[in-house]
Image (tube, rainbow, N blue to C red):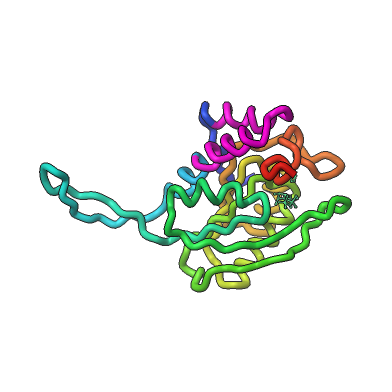
């Protein structure tokens, strides 16, 4: 496996444990999704460029910094929405593109039902948001569609990744960096991540 940044931190381990616990209620699940997502966004935005600017404090002038507005967020509907709100809190001006993909329950193959991307994404750092990387089918399709629209610099922010999904992204999109808080053991026969946390969308949206 390559191009994968595993983000480990006591806060992440604590929140992930709560997310994995099948007895966690929806409200708590949402709260800890936000905590973990913000930590991932902090890491994924580490390479954002800064410009210098002079500002006046109440005491003197000093040099400050401003982040270039160079990112685009692309949450994969529906579960990716859960990471959008925490991401937007840090970078509230960031344009957002959407793609809707849903896995067939029997084949685990994702089919696309929606797409709307911002214009002029060629020079932007596009951060795909999807909490679960299982077979990698949904994210691979998303990256492919973004490339067809001119996207060049693409990274993935996810919460739990399976080795199968990481290997697929490595093979099909070798330049894409994956930021994740967990690399789990394997996929089961239904292509669910083990130990995983179950169906993320159902748990987050209470369906
Ligand atoms: C889940 C998850 C990912 C996808 C991962 O979405 O949110 O998008 O499965 O699986 P993959 O790597 O094998 O493609 P799902 O299709 O269940 O739709 P949802 O977000 O609407 O719940
Ligand atoms: N999608 C989920 O929500 N969970 C999994 O384990 C795999 C795909």
Q: Check the picture and name the quadrant holding the C terminus.
A: top right
Q: Residue at x 61, y 51 (%)?
A: 81
Task: Determine the residue positioned at 62% across, 35% down.
Answer: 27
Residue 79 picture location, percent across and down: 66, 49
**Which quarter of the rendering shows the N terminus?**
top right
Residue at the image position 60 percent from the left and 39 percent from the top? 30
Residue 9, position as x, y percentages in the image: 51, 30
Q: Could you say which quadrant of the image residue 51 lies in?
A: bottom left
In the picture shown, does residue 114 fall above or below 28? below
Return the x and y of residue 86 as percentages of the image width and height: 51, 46
- In the depicted structure, whether residue 196 falls above or below residue 117: above
Examine the rendering and report whether any part of residue 157 can be seen: yes
Instruction: Residue lying at the far left in this picture: please name it.
Output: 60
- Total labels: the figure holds 0
Instruction: Choose between 154 and 138: the one closer to the eye.
Output: 138
Asked whether residue 3 is in view, the answer is no
Question: For residue 30: magenta?
Answer: yes
Q: Where residue 38 sits: x, y (%)? A: 50, 42
**In the rendered view, would you say 139 is above or below 21?**
below
Within the magenta stretch, is there residue 148?
no
Residue stretch rendered in magenta on the structure: 12-38
Which of 55 and 148 lies nearest the eye of the viewer?
Answer: 55
Residue at the (40%, 53%) spot, across then down: 48
Residue toward you, 181 or 91: 91
Q: Main SS of the magenta segment? A: helix
């Amino acid at each position: 496996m390559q191009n994968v940044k595993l983000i480990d931190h006591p806060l992440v381990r604590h929140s992930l444990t709560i997310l994995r616990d099948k007895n966690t209620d929806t409200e708590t699940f949402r709260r800890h999704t936000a905590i973990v997502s913000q930590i991932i966004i902090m890491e994924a935005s580490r390479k954002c460029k800064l410009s210098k600017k002079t500002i006046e404090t109440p005491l003197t002038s000093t040099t400050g910094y401003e982040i270039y507005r160079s990112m685009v967020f692309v949450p994969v509907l529906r579960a990716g929405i859960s990471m959008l709100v925490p991401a937007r809190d840090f970078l509230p001006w960031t344009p957002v593109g959407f793609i809707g993909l849903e896995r067939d329950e029997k084949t685990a193959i994702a089919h696309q039902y929606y797409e709307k991307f911002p214009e002029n994404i060629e020079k932007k750092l596009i951060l795909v948001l999807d909490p679960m990387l299982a077979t990698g089918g949904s994210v691979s399709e998303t990256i492919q569609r973004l490339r067809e629209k001119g996207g060049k610099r693409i990274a993935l922010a996810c919460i739990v990744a399976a080795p199968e999904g990481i290997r697929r992204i490595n093979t099909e999109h070798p330049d894409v960096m994956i930021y994740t808080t967990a690399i789990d053991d394997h996929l089961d026969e239904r292509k669910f991540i083990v130990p995983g946390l179950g169906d993320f969308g159902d748990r987050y949206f209470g369906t």
